[in-house]
Amino acid sequence: MRNGTTSDTTATTTAMLDLRDVRLTLESGAGEVNILRGVNLVVPRGQTVAVLGPSGSGKSSLLMVAAGIERATAGRITIAGTDITTLNEDGRAAFRQRHIGVVFQAFHLVPAMTALENVMVPMEIAGHRDALKRARAALESVGLDHRLGHYPTQLSGGEQQRVALARAFAMEPELVLADEPTGNLDGETGHTVANLLFGMSRKRGTTLLLVTHDPELATRCGRILNMHDGKLVEADEQ
Amino acid sequence: MGLAARFARRDLRGAALSFRFLSLCLTLGVAAIAAVGVFAAAVEEGLLRDGRALLGGDLEFRVIQRAANPDEREALDRLGTVSHVMTMRAMAEAKGTPKRVLIELKSVDHAYPLAGTVGLDPAMDLGQALAPQDGVFGAVAASGFGSRLGIDVGDRFTVGKATFELRAILQSEPDRGADALSFGPRVMVSEAGIESTGLVRPGSMIRHGYRLALTDRTPDQAAQTFAEEFPKSGFRPRSLAEATPQAKTQVERVRVFLTLVGFASLLVGGIGVAQSVQSHLTQKRPTIAILKSLGASSALIGRTYAVEVATMAAIGIVAGLALGAVCAIVAAEVAGDLLPLAFTARAVVEPLASAALAGILATFAFTVPPLARARAVSPAILLRGETDGDGRRTPWTAWPWAAAALVMLIAIFALEAPDRRIVLYAAVGTLAAAAILVGLGVAVRRIGGALHEHLAASGTGDTRLRLALANLARPGSATVPVTIALGLAMTLFVSLVEVESNMRREIEERIPDRAPAYFFIDIPPEDGRTFDSAVWSVRGAEAIERRPMVRGRIVAVNDTPIERVNIAPGARWVADGDRGLTVAPMPPTGTHIVAGEWWPSDYSGPPLISFDARAAQGFGVGVGDTLTLNILGREITGRIANLRAIDWTSFGVNFAMMLSPGALDGAPMSDIAAVYTTPDAEDAVADAVADKLPAVTAIRVREVLDSAISLLTRIAGATETVAAAAVAAGLLVLIGALAAARRAQLYETAVLRAVGASRATIIGIAAIEHAIIGLVAVIAAAILGTVAAWAAVRYAIGMEWSFAPLPALIAILATMAATGAFGAAAAWRLLAVPAARLLAADSA
């Protein structure tokens, strides 16, 4: 069994995402916890990848490390040719804002902002003057043009996740990282959201790395990986 | 800033209320400082506005115990229009009754007043009111005079040998000034009238004022012209700028004191500000993490929340300025007749700007740390939840900024104060107290946690107590901020009450114990024996201290003119005006010589001086140095032979300077005497002296003390009002802490109820938790406040210290009760929310 997917090292130059021996160790009251134990992964541009694994296997941590939200303890993470492990937190935030869209299981909308404002945020940070127009269009594309002025608490779970999808795709990122995007939703709503997610990424040719514990959802991806005890393996290699 | 402002606006839409404690705390602190500043500035402006009237003209020359000689008068007349007034203390007696009243007697000439107007009731011309009619001089007097003597307008009374008819009530006297301590009502008579009393004689304690309406010179030029022509006249010029230096100094002192109290209120409020911002930003940590996950930089986060804080602080500061201004105006209504007040643009704008700046600096100092923590929040908390340590510790870079703002805050108070050391001592003391309280708060948390663990492990102790102890130590508990805020506020309160209690006790109990019953002044030296026998004729007379006295002032120290001598603030009073001088062949009983030696009783050489040791220290002189005194226009230089430690609070006949025999020969002296009696013999002694020597003036010490107590009560009232802002700020911090903890406690309460805890148990837990914090804070406050009061009483005021346990005890009980009650009330409110709803919501 090979650890990770380092089969094609020459693909690095064309890869959207390239993780090399990525490790994440956190301090806890009980001592050090090794969450990622040397993850290797190369994802070519436009590929859709699902990471399956039980709770606590480290799959969400992998996503956060790849997004630069969590800083890797060791290893190299190259996204669109940039090694983000050399960037500080603000540098990673700026990089994320230009290249990455993130969808969280718990939606993570800003409660004090309306749906429209939530979608506008990344574009406003980027200094886009047409943020309002683009946000409106993004919400229309997820079928929420009638909910623009609603606050997150006034939206259903499915609607909140659609707002989050609109926000993640509004900046037309090259890479979208989705952490259990349907995990907090019922079956039907989850299905709708998944359709939207795959539809949008296909339409835009976005590279998608999806973390889920739902095998059915994973099968919709072009490639499936399994996470076990902080290590990543191709599903077909198990 | 545009994007930050936009984000801030969105964020505040739903959260402005969570900042209410920030705004309220700032409002209180800023209002306290603004009110004090505006009121004091209005008094200063009032003194300036009324300066010419208060001074009585453009320039005044003052001289004591003698009038201008013809040459001097002629020189004064050449400078402009002259008005001559004389003032002295004297006894007025109702015609045909034994009633006698100490009065402030003043004679005026036809030119009076050169500035301002005299208001009389019934309205009449002043000259006409004072003129003789049917061989009796007229007089006008302040409203209290008639009632105290039991006479009405139209009735007659005597002063010395003269009889006067009270023609009108003196409604307004333009040059009355702002004498805080006055010994009796003003009675105004003509020059001829005062002459006829027989009290104007060499050695009498009469102050002469020559006021000038200048024709073609400035006050400085006129003063210089006169000084060049009569260099040793002893005339002291006073211009508009110094019209009311005493009042100005008193106002200044009270202002600095009250501003310091305001500063403490602002510090207590600052803790509320920090707590409010921290509580808000703690709630906003997920939002910050989301924004960062979407690409927001730490700087953008910092700016966003800085805009929010600045907006809410601005609201608090503006409200504080408005409230302060209103309080100043209300205070003006209350004290309007005591002080001249002018709410000019300067009187309002400058102090308000200063208070606003103080509010801004306090906001900065107290919000930089929580804002820096917000900047450091990691987006990873979206994954790991709130166990994350990022953004919980304050980045070290925040502390120098916060410290700089605090130093600037102290500096603006210090720069405005005449004696910066006091401000610095007070500021350092306050910060030290705050540091001690921080340590104590942390200790309470740790000990609470440890005790809880011990009780839980051993299975002993009351459940409510155990849970209350656990609450003290829980993450985000208000133990530390509430301990600091309540502790500081109560420290201030206890120290003020202790100082006031000490001063009151000194005046009400200690001084009367050893003070004489009466001072008698203007006793002709030849009547000394008559005076003594009159006193001793009364059963109950215990002792007489009688000494000859003449007034004189220091004009040079070691031949350096006094104006150029650097004198410590505490000793300036000795040089500021005329002081009583006496000659003594022998050291008076109880004299404590600390340096040098007393002269032989038969000494007859060049003048020697025995000087007050504390004044000598302030002057920087010692035995062997010389002082030059101007006594009624004659200058004598004497060598300091010894230094005496004088207890000025003894109220005996004390002199800062005593001279060797012969030094004052030829000077017109009169005797001053302090008479000690049993309480029931006081009136009899006064009557006996009045019978034998009607011209001698009696000053009853009890009345002077009452007057001092009334002044003390007014100042204490003002101080306690300002200190109330600090106590209110302290309570706000407590209420703010309870509000901040509400979200977490709602859940805890619901769980406790779900597992069967009764309402009484839950309220009991909250009451015990907060009573413990209150008890610790206030015991610390009682100790710190007592230490501060002791230092102030012992070293700043120089009095004997005595601890008054009652104020400290009341503070302890009241604070404990208040904190416990607030905690219990908060728990009561928590109980109003159905537990099922909360638990269901949590599981949803």
Image (cartoon, coloured by chain):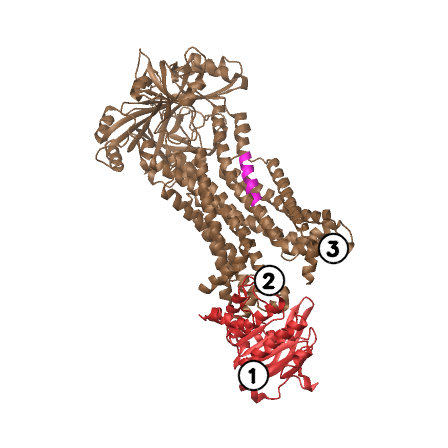
Chain colours: A red, B brown
- Helix, strand or loop status at disc 1: loop
Residue A46, label in figure: 1
Residue A178 colored in magenta in the image: no
Tag 3: residue type? Ala
Residue contact between numbered discs 2 and 3, judged by CB atoms under 8 Å: no
The image shows a total of numbered marks equal to: 3
Tell me which corner region of the image, top left, top right, bottom left or bottom right, holds residue B78: top left
Residue A153, label in figure: 2
Q: Residues within 10 Å of mark 1 (few under 14, many from 20)?
A: some
**Nearest the camera: A152 or A179?**
A152
Tag 2: residue type? Thr
- The magenta stretch is B488-501
**Nearest the camera: A116 or B469?**
A116
**Is the residue B738 above or below the residue B603 in the image?**
below
What chain is tagged by disc 3? B
Sequence-wise first label, 2 or 1: 1
Is there one chain holding both mark 3 and mark 1?
A: no
Mark 3–mark 1 distance (CA, rounded to whole Å): 52 Å
What chain is tagged by disc 2? A
Residue B490 colored in magenta in the image: yes
Q: Which residue is mark 3?
A: B754
Tag 1: residue type? Gly
Residue B35, label in figure: none
